[in-house]
Every structure is written in C-alpha cells, then in structure tokens.
C-alpha cells in the first residue's frame, strides 16, 4: 500500500446515508463516505455487496431512494457546485470494437463536450498516456486485452474529470498491463483527480489505494488505511509463532501457548518487537526450532469482517 | 463421443426457449401464414374468385345479358363499381368521360377488383345491331396486378358472344333453309350430306351475323362453314382459349368484320415503363429496411450490456438525446437504403423515379420513420440482443408475408388483405403502389402517410416511455 495518506482538505464528493432498494433487495443500506481530491479510494467487498449500485448512484445512473450525494466544487474552480466533471469506466469494455482507437476517442470526447483543437490535443495526450500512440488507427477489436482496457480508461478522461469512477478496471489483464494502468491512475491522482475504484484484487487495493472501504450487504463495514483496518479488525498487524522441540517451561510475555507448550503465538504492533522477543528467548535459554512471522493483510481484514461463507 | 456432442446440442436447444421457437414454431407459423394466403384466406374453404367490376353507361339488352352471364359464372364475383359523388359528375363530360376514368381509377386503387368490364355508350341492344364497320366493343380495364384476370374474363366473354352468335346464326339459317328447301323444323341442316351441329356451343371465329345472312341470301346452299370455316372446335374449358387474344390486340376503332371486340386496357402502363418493378423494389426495400433497422436498434441493447450506454449516460448526452440520435440514424439509414434500391431500379429496370419523385419522397420518409420507431420500440421491449433477433425475425417475416413484401397482395383474399393492414408494410407498399403504379396525386397518399407517421409517433413515444428501463439494466 502507498503511504497511509490521511485525507486532507475539502472533499470533492460526499455521500450521506445513501439508500437504494430493488424490489425485495436492499442494495445500499445507508452509505456515508467522503472522497478527496488526489485520492485513490478502493472499494472492496464480496459479490453482491452493493459496490456497483453505489457507483451507479454516484455517477447519476441510479437515483438513491434516500440520502444525499453531493459533489463539491473545488476552491478556485469555476465549476458550480454539483457541476463537477466526472467520468465512468464501466466494468466491461465500454468501447466500440468496430471503431479505431482514434475514432473511439473522438466520439467519447465529443460526448463529453470536448471538440475541435482541444479534442485533438487531448487525444494526443491521452494516446501517449495510455501507451496507444502506435495503435491510433487500429480497429479496437484487434487490440490486446490490456490495450483495450487502457483505451477503456482513456475514453473516460478526455474531459479531465475531477472524479473518476472505475468499476474493476483491471479485470483480465496481464501484470504488465495492470502495472501500466495503475501508473496511469497514479498520474491522474497526482493531477488532483479523485478516483474511486472497485476491485476484487486484494493486492491492488492493498498496494495501490490510499484508503480502503470494505462493503458487505449494502453497508460499509470498515474504512481507512490498511493499517487502520487491521487495527480495527485483527488488532495488531503482525503475528509471530514459535515452535519448540520440547515443551517450553518458561513463561514468555504476551505469548499464548498451546498444549503441550511446544507452540507459542503473539501479535505484534511492529516488526521491531521481534528482536526483543528473540533476546528474551536467548536469556531464558529457550531456542525455538521454527519461527513463523506473518503480517496481516486485507484478506485477513476482509475475512474477519465478512466471514468465510460463500457469497453469490 | 458423438452421443455426447448430440447431447450438448440437445441441452443447448432445450435451455434456449427462443431458439426452440425459431427452430420448431416459426416454420409452423409461416406455413400457416402462406397456407392462409394461398388457401384464399383464413377460415375460408371456397376457391378464390376473380373480382370483376362492372361499369356500363347504358342498360341495353345485350349488356344486361352479358352482366347476367358473368354473374352466373361461379368463378367470378361480379359487382357494379361504386357510384361517384354526384358533385363529381360533370354534365359537360358525362359519366363516360373524365368522371368515368375517375370512377375506374378509384375502383382500381381500392384493390377490390382484379378487373373492370367497361361497356361504351354505343354498346348495341343485340348482337345483330352492330354497325357496318364497327364491332361490339367490350373494354377490360386492369391494373395489371393479376395478369390471369384478363385472359380468363376474355375467354368467358368470348364464350358469351359465341353462344349469342351461334343462336342468332342458327336461328336465321333454319329460317332460310326451311323457307327454301322446305326442310322440316329440326335442329340440323345439311351440307354435302354432312350434318352440322347448330345447337352445340362451339368456338366460332366471330363474323358478323349480317355477313352470314348476306351470303345466305345470295346462295341458297350457303352454309357458314363454307366461307368461314371453324378455325377451331374446342371446349370453352380448353386452356388454349386462355391465350387466344387476337381480338384483344386489334385496334379498337379499325373497320372490322368481327362481331365483337375485347380490348384490354391498362391505364397505368400507357404512360410509364416498368411500373411493376417499382412495386418489387418497394417490397424488398421495406423487408430489408425492417431487418436493418432492428439491427441498428439492437446496438442500443449491446451498449447497455457492455456498459457503453452507462458511459454515454454519464457524459453530457441524456437518454432523450441518445434515443433521438439513434432514431434519427435509423431513419436516415432507412431513407438512404430505399433510395439506393430505387435508384438501382431506375438505372437498371427503368422505373420512373424522377417522374414520381415527390410521392417517392413522401412515402420513403414516412416508411423510414415508421420503421425506425418500430425498431426502437422493439429494442425497448426486448431484454437482450439475442431476444431482439429472435422476436424481430418472427415479427418482420410475419409482417412482410401478410403485408405484401413476399407475396403480392392481389393474390390474397380480402380477409388476408385486411389482416395485412395491421402491418405497416402493407400501408407502405400501398403507398408506393399509388405513386408508381396508379400515378396518384400526393393527396391520395393521405391515409398511408397518416398511418405510417401515426405509427412512428405512437411507437416513438412508446420508446421514450420505456427507455427509462435502460438505466435499470444490471
């Protein structure tokens, strides 16, 4: 995960107790959150948690049953409140396969109100940004999966959105393309855009997102940085297990022994605690035969929060 | 392994109701439609009759007999043309002039007559009363849609005159022979010992009775067979008679020895070249227009499925603009498609597009508008592209079958024609027919244009109302 950036400044988007139901299903049961400029907010949750419904509500495709979604104009911006530019990168390839790369960019740029010389300049920038300059005139259907994904994103940024909603933008792409996509997203956040991303890729959320929101059953069950989530759920971020060939008779502070005291476990706030533990063991002349150390990640947080039962 | 492959095929078919419908139900539906068309209409067991219109300015005895003869024929459905509004009949021109032409033209455009029998003012009281250099004239006015109608009715009228001729000649011959040879009254006369049947309905080459009488007056031994031999002695049911059109092709007003003359008139063909091709062009164009329109409308469902629609909706384009843009695209594509078809027909088959350009434009824009709305509404009703494909195939082929794109509407029964009116294919083709075949004025397209544009409006509004569901996909 990137540095645990705490959101600062004024939010560009605020959701307040947003609810949405489909017939007998409560898809969103009161979602509240804020999105800040320059932030990459990762939405994580099992299938059917309500992530896509939330993105559709934010994008305006769905009207919430109750609650408010407010887009805030930035200080010094000419945009009126509620007129903040936003873009959507749908989960599927929402581009025209029988148009060329250039033609796709042109039509989506025009749909966003960009035209003329400005559009041409933006297209040139975006082609370089997405590393598609050499495929400008290729039919989209002839591109590789990774290229199509990059074009899918590129089509949504021609109007320089202040909020970009990405619904699983890296599905089905190879590691190189994924790396390229995240470097593209990082450039966008560096320019001040606020990105809201849903994904099933744990490593992506852990490594790429500034903040993480975990959703389940239409509710936000936790949000914050990874460290904060671990703190909120598991307690401490590291776990150490000592195994002995013979039962350890000496007490070890903060360790929990199993019977017959050949294995001891404890949580650590920091890895710096491990040398201290080793020093204590040396003092009491108890050398473990094996030492396992593990840092908790989002998977642990996720399973802790959502349980292990299968979902839809 | 082969069994497993077969099982996969079976399971896929079983799990796909639409494909099942296409494979097993569609053929039955189409069989039923075509059976209904060719079996003279739904729930009708009788043979299709030729519908003959009758217009006669004089009620002479011979005209009345001809009408009764036609009425008595079970294969004809003979009826008088609807009368004109009295205000439309100008006394200066009379019913036999322009007003009669209007009356006939309207009757033809109604599509209710395969052929119209027109008797002129000078139609005689009896067959014996024909003038020295004129024939007993019968006009068969046809719009050319049913090419068999003229041949069939011609042969029937020839049969009528043959009977009349035989009766007149035999009666007079017997009178003469009884007077000169004192033969006893009977049904036979003698010529060189050969009996001549005089009461048998036979096909004569039609020579005026007056010529026969004159010959008999000059030579007491004269028999018609001596100078005017029977060219044929055939039954009226002989198919050969159907192609006997010598009388039809002769000029109407030339001096003639023949007792009667049948003239076939096709007013529409007199002033243009290949007008019938225009109908085929329209029929095929409308059929493919429907398919291409639904194909383009299906792109909306594709966009909804792929998420492209979501992206567009999030952009500055609203749903109304998207729907209108799609509709306009399909409309323009339809206009272009029909225009190309007619331009090709003009270039290769010499239909007169330029001459009927205004009517063509009116019908093409109306048809394309209705088609665009139909396709868009279909896209709104269906959940997916595959569903739309299946439903559109069923609907379009059905509409085209009963609407006249596949089978000319003149072969259909009135009931099938009425059913065809439920499809706008029929209205479109009727409109093109009026423009290219009947050469009707633009005002005559009022009904067709009203129905087509009305359909376009209603289905367009229906599309807009249902379009909200596109947002709820997922």
Image (cartoon, coloured by chain):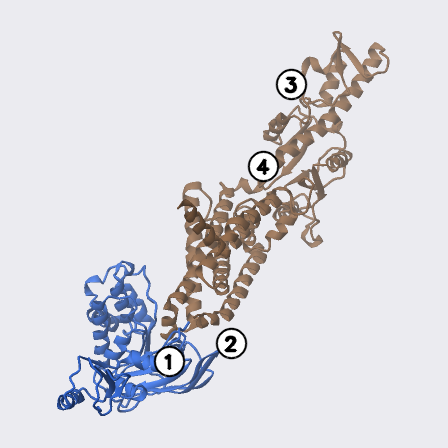
Chain colours: A blue, B brown
Q: Which circle's residue, 1 or 2, is located before the other in the chain?
A: 2
How many C-alpha atoms fall within 10 Å of the one at disc 3: few (<14), some, or many (≥20)?
few
How many C-alpha atoms fall within 10 Å of the one at disc 1: few (<14), some, or many (≥20)?
some
Which one is in front in this view, the residue at disc 2 or the one at disc 4? 2
| Circles 2 and 4 in contact, beta carbons < 8 Å | no
Image position, residue B227 (x, y; %): 68, 14
Which one is in front in this view, the residue at disc 3 or the one at disc 2? 2
Q: What residue do we see at 74% from left, 26% from top?
A: B163
| Tag of residue B87 | none
| Circles 1 and 2 in contact, beta carbons < 8 Å | no
Which one is in front in this view, the residue at disc 4 or the one at disc 1? 1
For marks 1 and 2, give the CA distance. Answer: 24 Å
- The residue identified by callout 1 is A306
Image position, residue A81 (x, y; %): 35, 87
Helix, strand or loop under label 3 = loop
Quadrant the C terminus of chain B occupies:
bottom left
- The residue identified by callout 4 is B147
| Circles 4 and 1 in contact, beta carbons < 8 Å | no
For marks 2 and 4, give the CA distance. Answer: 62 Å
- The residue identified by callout 2 is A23
Vertical arrangement, residue A108 with respect to residue A271, above or below:
above
Pick the front one: A19 or B319: A19
For marks 4 and 1, give the CA distance. Answer: 80 Å
Helix, strand or loop under label 2 = loop
Q: What residue do we see at 54% from left, 40% from top?
A: B269
| Circles 3 and 2 in contact, beta carbons < 8 Å | no
Please tell me if label 2 and label 4 are on a single chain.
Answer: no
Please tell me if label 4 and label 1 are on a single chain.
Answer: no
């Amino acid at each position: 995960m990137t540095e645990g950036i705490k959101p600062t400044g004024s939010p560009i988007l605020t959701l307040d107790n947003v609810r949405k139901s489909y017939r007998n299903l409560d898809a969103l049961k009161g979602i509240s959150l804020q999105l800040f400029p320059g932030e990459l907010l990762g939405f994580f949750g099992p299938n059917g948690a309500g992530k896509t419904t939330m993105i559709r509500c934010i994008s305006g495709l769905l009207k919430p049953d109750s609650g408010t979604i407010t887009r805030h104009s930035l200080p010094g911006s000419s945009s009126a409140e509620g007129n903040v530019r936003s873009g959507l990168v749908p989960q599927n390839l929402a581009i025209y396969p029988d148009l060329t790369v250039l033609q796709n960019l042109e039509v989506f740029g025009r749909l966003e109100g960009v035209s003329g010389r400005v559009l041409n300049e933006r297209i040139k920038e975006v082609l370089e940004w997405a590393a598609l300059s050499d495929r400008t005139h290729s039919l989209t259907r002839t591109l590789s999966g990774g290229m199509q994904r990059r074009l899918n994103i590129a089509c949504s940024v021609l109007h320089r959105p202040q909020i970009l909603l990405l619904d699983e933008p890296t599905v089905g792409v190879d590691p190189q393309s994924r790396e390229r996509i995240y470097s593209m997203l990082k450039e966008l956040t560096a320019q001040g855009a606020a990105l809201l991303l849903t994904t099933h890729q744990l490593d992506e959320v852990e490594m790429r997102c500034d903040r993480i929101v975990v959703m389940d059953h239409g509710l936000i069950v936790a949000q914050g940085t990874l460290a904060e989530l671990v703190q909120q759920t598991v307690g401490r971020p590291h776990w150490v297990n000592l195994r002995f060939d013979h039962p350890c008779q000496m007490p070890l502070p903060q360790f929990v022994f199993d019977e017959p005291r050949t294995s001891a476990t404890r949580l650590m706030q920091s890895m710096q605690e491990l040398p201290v533990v080793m020093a204590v063991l040396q003092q009491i002349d108890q050398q473990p035969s094996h030492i396992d150390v593990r840092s908790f990640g989002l998977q642990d947080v996720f399973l802790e929060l959502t349980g292990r039962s299968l979902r839809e | 392994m082969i069994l497993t492959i077969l099982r996969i095929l079976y399971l896929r078919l079983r799990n796909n109701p639409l494909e099942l419908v296409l494979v097993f139900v569609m053929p039955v539906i189409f069989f039923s439609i075509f059976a209904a068309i060719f079996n003279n209409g739904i729930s009708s067991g009788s043979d299709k009759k030729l519908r003959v219109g009758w217009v006669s300015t004089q009620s002479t005895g011979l005209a009345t007999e001809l009408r009764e003869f036609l009425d008595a024929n079970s294969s004809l459905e003979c009826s008088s043309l609807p009368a004109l509004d009295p205000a439309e009949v100008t006394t200066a021109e009379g019913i036999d002039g322009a007003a009669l032409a209007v009356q006939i033209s309207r009757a033809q455009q109604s599509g209710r007559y395969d052929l119209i029998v027109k008797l002129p003012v000078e139609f005689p009281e009896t067959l014996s009363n024909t003038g020295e250099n004129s024939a007993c004239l019968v006009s068969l006015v046809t719009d050319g849609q049913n090419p068999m109608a003229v041949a069939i009715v011609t042969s029937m009228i020839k049969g009528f005159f043959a009977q009349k001729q035989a009766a007149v000649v035999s009666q007079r011959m017997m009178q003469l022979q009884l007077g000169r040879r004192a033969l006893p009254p009977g049904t036979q006369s003698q010529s060189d010992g050969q009996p001549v049947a005089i009461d048998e309905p036979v096909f004569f080459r039609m020579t005026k009775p007056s010529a026969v009488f004159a010959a008999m007056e000059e030579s007491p031994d004269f028999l018609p067979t001596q100078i005017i031999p029977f060219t044929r002695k055939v039954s009226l049911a002989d198919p050969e008679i159907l192609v006997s059109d010598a009388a039809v092709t002769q000029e109407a007003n030339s001096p003639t020895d023949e007792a009667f003359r049948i003239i076939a008139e096709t007013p529409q063909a007199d002033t243009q070249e290949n007008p019938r091709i225009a109908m085929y062009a329209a029929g095929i164009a409308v059929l493919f227009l429907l398919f291409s329109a639904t194909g383009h409308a299906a792109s909306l469902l594709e966009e909804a499925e792929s998420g492209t629609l979501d992206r567009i909706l999030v952009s500055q384009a609203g749903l109304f603009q998207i729907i209108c843009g799609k509709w306009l695209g399909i409309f323009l594509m339809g206009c272009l498609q029909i225009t190309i078809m007619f331009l090709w027909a003009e270039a290769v088959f010499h239909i007169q597009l330029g001459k009927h350009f205004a009517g063509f434009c009116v019908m093409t824009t109306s048809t394309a508008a209705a088609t665009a709305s139909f396709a868009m509404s279909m896209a709104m009703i269906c959940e997916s592209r595959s569903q739309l494909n299946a439903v559109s195939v069923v609907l379009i082929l059905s509409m085209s079958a009963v609407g006249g794109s596949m089978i000319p509407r003149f072969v259909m029964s009135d009931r099938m024609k009425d059913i065809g009116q439920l499809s706008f294919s029929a209205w479109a083709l009727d409109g093109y027919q009026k423009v290219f075949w009947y050469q009707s004025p633009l005002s005559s397209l009022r009904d067709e244009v009203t129905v087509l544009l009305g359909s376009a409006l209603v289905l367009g509004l229906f599309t807009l109302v249902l379009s909200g569901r596109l947002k709820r996909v997922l």
